[in-house]
Image (cartoon, coloured by chain):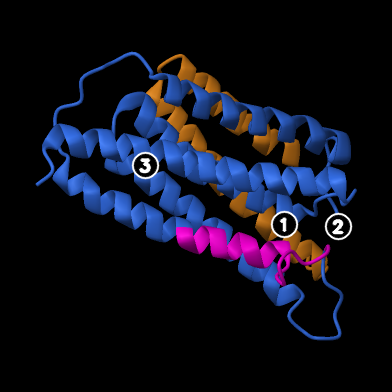
Amino acid sequence: MLSLNHTGSLQKTLNALFIMVICGVLLSGYSYQFLKAELPCPLCMLQRLAMIGVAMGPLLNLSFGIRMEHYALSLFSCVFGAAVSLRQIALHVCRNFSTFGEPVLGFDLYVWAFIVFTCSIFAVALLLFLYGFGKEKEIPHEPSPLNKVVFGLLALVVVGNIVTTFMECGFSPCKG
Amino acid sequence: MMAALFLLFGICLFLIITKERKPALYLALVNLVLCFLMLLHHATSILEIRL
């Protein structure tokens, strides 16, 4: 049987892994933007924002200890992101309508985004399940090297998106 | 305006660095509400509905 300390460290490792996966998805979307020279539409940007919101919960967990409200933030973001993806799927659902961008492995990017948000809901549910087992008192500690790496990765994604979105849209709400 | 939403998440990261837990959490939640309003703006502008 897992001890409380083991469950706590397992949760933190899973949180770090969760951020890495989300950052991987964001960076692959970002590379798609540059390699295929396809500028993201407003709904794509809202999906990116929702993914950053999803990663913000685990990041708060790594920085301040594991809490319910951090997972709630991730869940809010998951539901919002899934709603945005579903809206975009609905906009392109008819066969004769144009799609946005080239499909990747048979699916459009907004379909992949919906899959990512749905999987994230399952991942948060799993982490919440583990939360019940690892309710130990949080002791403030120095961030581990893994925490620093995931923090840097997310910061890189956010700063990159601020710059490129500003270059694309300026001060106006993006049109597309 | 869309860049400002990313900027707000950037400010959240800064607040996490400075160990401000609650402001970072609330700012992230406010940002999500603003994102929802942006979705509403997009949905109404594409249908040319004036609210």
- What residue is rendered at 45% in x and 44% in y? A18
Residue extending farthest to the front is: A1
Provide the chain ID for the residue under circle 3: A
Provide the chain ID for the residue under circle 2: A
The chain whose colour is orange is B
**Amino acid under label 2?**
Gly
The mark nearer the N terminus, 2 or 3, is 3
Residue B11: quadrant of the picture: top right
Pointer 2 residue: A176
Q: Is residue A16 visible?
A: yes
Pointer 3 residue: A14
Where, quadrant-wise, is the C terminus of chain B in this rendering? bottom right
Say if mark 1 contacts mark 2, CB within 8 Å.
yes
Colour given to chain A in the rendered image: blue
The mark nearer the N terminus, 1 or 2, is 1
Gap between marks 1 and 3, in whole Å?
A: 29 Å
Pointer 1 residue: A43
- What residue is rendered at 82% in x and 47% in y? A33
